[in-house]
Each structure stands twice: as structure tokens, then as C-alpha cells.
Image (spheres, rainbow, N blue to C red):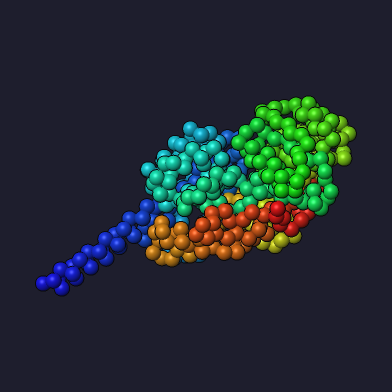
Amino acid sequence: MHRRIAMIAVAAAMAMAADASAQTRGVTKAEIVLGMHTDLSGVAATYGVTSSNAARMRFDEINEADGINGRKVRLIVEDNGYQVPKAVQACNKLINRDKVFAFLGALGTPMNNACFKDQFAAEVPNLFPLSAARSMYEPFNRLKFYSAATYTDQIRSAVNYFVTERGKKAVCVMYQDTDFGKEIIDGAELQAKKLNIKLVEAAAHKPTDQDFTAPITRLRQAGCDLILMGTIVRDSIVPYVTARKLGWTDVDFVGSSAAYDGVVGAAQGMDGFYAMGITEMPYPDSPVPAIRAFAERYKQRFNVDPNIGAVYGYIIADLAATGLKNAGPDLTLDSFIGGLEAIKGYKDIFNSPEISFGPQIRKGADSSFLAEVKGGRWTRVTQPLGF
């Protein structure tokens, strides 16, 4: 009698375990459902559209090759318009209606931050967001995975390189008065302290400012010979062109990956501008065969050349697929976390720094390289740099 009861108990436990596995949100025997909230209609749509396109393209390639451990990947994309209220609505839909397994490539620092509470309460991982803010992996949360060097890391590498290798002595900062700009200031201050130097001057501006003559004049009068740029696209172009038109040529300007953009490189008068990059530009005539092939496939499908956002989207989809593959056929949240933590020395096709995670490691890389605009194109100047 006792033996029969024990056997029944074991069978019940096994059934409950199988049922728990079957009930993993966003996972069926045939499918894994991922969600992305990104900008398809706002100021950052140039990144949101291309990153979501490229992520879909990578998952389609994987699905056509029999998927991952017998399952196909389906990506649901929602527009956050680069607005926090819309992002919260999109997140709620993905969590509660679509019941996605994980978020992938969510765009925007404040948009990610606004979704974290409800997202993590539902045990939905946040994978490789398109934001280089430290809050994407700090404080530690087992559901947060960020894959590249942060803005702070990038600026620290830039300061270290220009001071130690190029002899710069008067380091200054020009930055947006935003959370993004604070990341740049923090990086500059941290590395200046490490090198035992002081920042000479800092000038803040609003993202909507149009005229940069006053801050450029202020920085010039301070004798800056290196200006770290906490800027994105237009506010990278206008100050740099303004400085050169004013005849200020004995100073270097270097931005973060936020300024490492094809539009910035192609703008008139930008030759000589520097930025920190975390991956190669996807030029159709790239000397790297894999990048040329990617650019050709992307243009065939979407009838436009890829930009850097497309590169980011393709990488994060492939990285997510690597974690899913490592998790094995019995896909649960815990097995997936373990699959991501098992990623060591991951290399993409775009010559990015290697990516590794671990049980207590949620930032995959901390190095970036220096690139310069030459002839209207970004040219890589260094190998990956540290600080």
C-alpha cells in the first residue's frame, strides 16, 4: 500500500514538473514568442525601424534552418514612439496580452526604466536593450542582460586614449542636459580622477537647442584641446561645424556610440570628427565579406541600405538565439538564464568586442574602439580600447 502511494506521488510530481515546463510563458512545443518595444514613429525611428527589421531578418534565417531546438521564434514589435507613456502601454500589451517569453532590443533609456517594475514582476527578461545606460544592467537583476560597453565605459576609454596616447591636457565636456548627458559627464569625471587630471570646462545644452556659438566660444576660451561630446546626431554636427567655421582647429571632438551614426559621418564638414564605436558600419562596399553579404541581404529584403541600427538588431537577435540554443530543448526561464550565462567569447560578424556573461555578470563587454570621419565615412582608427 505504502509503495503504491509513493509511486502515485512520484508520478504526480513528474506530471506537475512537465506541466510547469509546458506552462512557461511565451513557449510552446513549436514556438518561442519574444517582444520588442521600440520607436517606429518618433525621433529615434531610424534606429527602431531598422533594428526591428534586422532582428526579424535574423530570426527568419534561423527559422528557415529549422529553428532553435525544434522551435521557431516569433517576434512581436510594438511602437513606443520614444515616449514613456506609449512604452508603458506597449510593455503592458506584450506582458499581459501577448505573454512574451522575453523582451529583446527595447529602445530608449527612460522607456526601458519605466517598464522594468511590471516586466520583472512578471518574470520577463530584458535582453540587450538599445540603450547604453548603466541602468540596463545595474543594480544586478538576474533578468537584466546588456551586451556592450556603456556610454560611461566608452568615454572613459576615449579619455584614456587621448590623454595617454595623444598627449591631450585640457579635457572638456559638451553634453545634453539629460540622463544621457549625465552618463557622459560621469565617464569623463571617473577617468579624469583615475588619471589624476581635472576637467577644464563643461558646457550643457538642451536637446532642442539650435545655436551652439556661445558654448563653443566658452570652451575655446577655456583652452580645451579635447572635447568629449554627450551628443547624438544634430547636436554633434552643428557644434563641430560651428567650431571649424570659427577657425578653431587645434582641438579634437569625440563622441560616444550615440554619435557614431551614418548621418553624422555623411554630413558636410564632419571630416576629422571622432566617436567611439562598438561595431563596424555596414557599408555595402565594406572590406569585410560577411558585412557586405549582410548589407546585400538587408537591402534585398527592405529596399534600403542598412544603418548602424540594423547591425544592432541583427546582433541582439543572434545573441538571443545563442542563449536559447544553450538552454536546450526543455526551455524554461531558469534554463534560459543558464543558457545566457553560458555565453563566453561570443563573436558576431561585425568585428565587435567579444561578449561574455556569467552567474554574476550581466554586462557582456566593456571595450569600444575609436573611429574617425574621413571622406564622409567612418573609418576605424584603433582596436578595442579599455580604461
User: Which is more toward the observer, 359 or 213?
Assistant: 359
Question: Residue 279 appears in which quarter of the rendering?
Answer: bottom right
State left or right for residue 66 relative to residue 147. Answer: left
State left or right for residue 320 relative to residue 32. Answer: right
Residue at position x 84%, y 35% in the image: 223
Residue 259 x, y percent position in the rendering: 70, 42
Question: Residue 176 appears in which quarter of the rendering?
Answer: top right
User: Which is more toward the observer, 148 or 3?
Assistant: 3
Residue 31 in view of the camera: no
Residue at position x 67%, y 61% in the image: 290
Residue 26 x, y percent position in the rendering: 39, 52
Residue 167 in view of the camera: yes
State left or right for residue 18 relative to residue 48. Answer: left
Residue at position x 37%, y 52% in the image: 25
Q: Specify the farthest residue to the front.
A: 196
Residue 211 x, y percent position in the rendering: 75, 26
Q: Is residue 302 above or below residue 22?
A: above
Residue 201 x, y percent position in the rendering: 76, 34
